[in-house]
Image (spheres, rainbow, N blue to C red):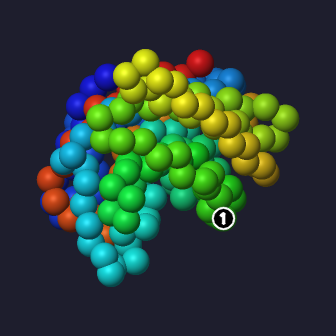
Amino acid sequence: MKRYHFKKGKHDASPVTLPRFYRSPRGFTVTVQPNQTAAYNILPDVDQWDINKLFGLAYSWTSNKYNTVYTGYRPNPDTGKFEVFGYLNDRGGIKNTRPFEIDYDEVVTIHVRFWNGMVAYHFTATKGGNIRQVVYNLDCSFPLDGIGRKVGMWHGGTKPAPKDYHLDVGFNVW
């Protein structure tokens, strides 16, 4: 895993993720280890509930807002948990899985598999020898058998990071 930093007032993480291209990937894996620096509360601002982007693949040469298979996250101040998601920009329409909640000292692995017009998000969290797993499927209307472009982390929706924080994240395409 690599440590990615967000600076207050910025959307992009550092270090910057350079684009890389993959021909007909079958999926990818994202591993995330959050920490308390990633907890923030900007309520009653509705942007608290924006899903921040982890890593994913875009099937558009110029935009991450169309035809993109992502993973995402946000802190939930109501529960004190860190939520991770599967997230699609499907031809400009957003779809996401239900949140998978973890503690800030847990590690979560998200295996994202492409098959038959669907994207399967398999979440696995481990803590103290206990394993929790769930799978969510999202229908995908764009083809996933072309060239995927690696896309990196982004804070927001509309607003940039409300404070400095970091996450340890791994990404592997297969």
| Residue 12, placed above or below residue 135 | below
**Residue 97 image point, x, y percent:** 62, 52
Query: How packed is label 1: few (under 14 Cα within 10 Å), some, or many (20 or more)?
Result: few
| Residue 166, placed above or below residue 90 | above
| Residue 143, placed above or below residue 164 | above
- The quarter in which the N terminus is drawn is top left
**Residue 55 image point, x, y percent:** 45, 39
Q: Is residue 78 toward the left or the right of residue 122 in the image?
A: left
Q: How many marks?
A: 1
Q: Would you say residue 60 is visible in this rendering? A: no
Task: Give the residue at the far right of this rendering.
Answer: 116
Q: Observer-nearest residue: 80 or 30?
A: 80
Q: Observer-nearest residue: 5 or 100?
A: 100
Q: Residue at x 44, y 50 (%)?
A: 83
- The quarter in which the C terminus is drawn is top right
Quarter of the view holding residue 32: top left
Type of amino acid at the residue the image marks with label 1: Gly
Is label 1 in a helix, a strand or a loop? Answer: strand
Q: Residue at x 77, y 41 (%)?
A: 118
Q: Residue at x 36, y 32 (%)?
A: 106
Residue topped by disc 1: 93
Task: Give the residue at the far bottom of this rendering.
Answer: 44
Q: Is residue 115 toward the left or the right of residue 155 in the image?
A: right
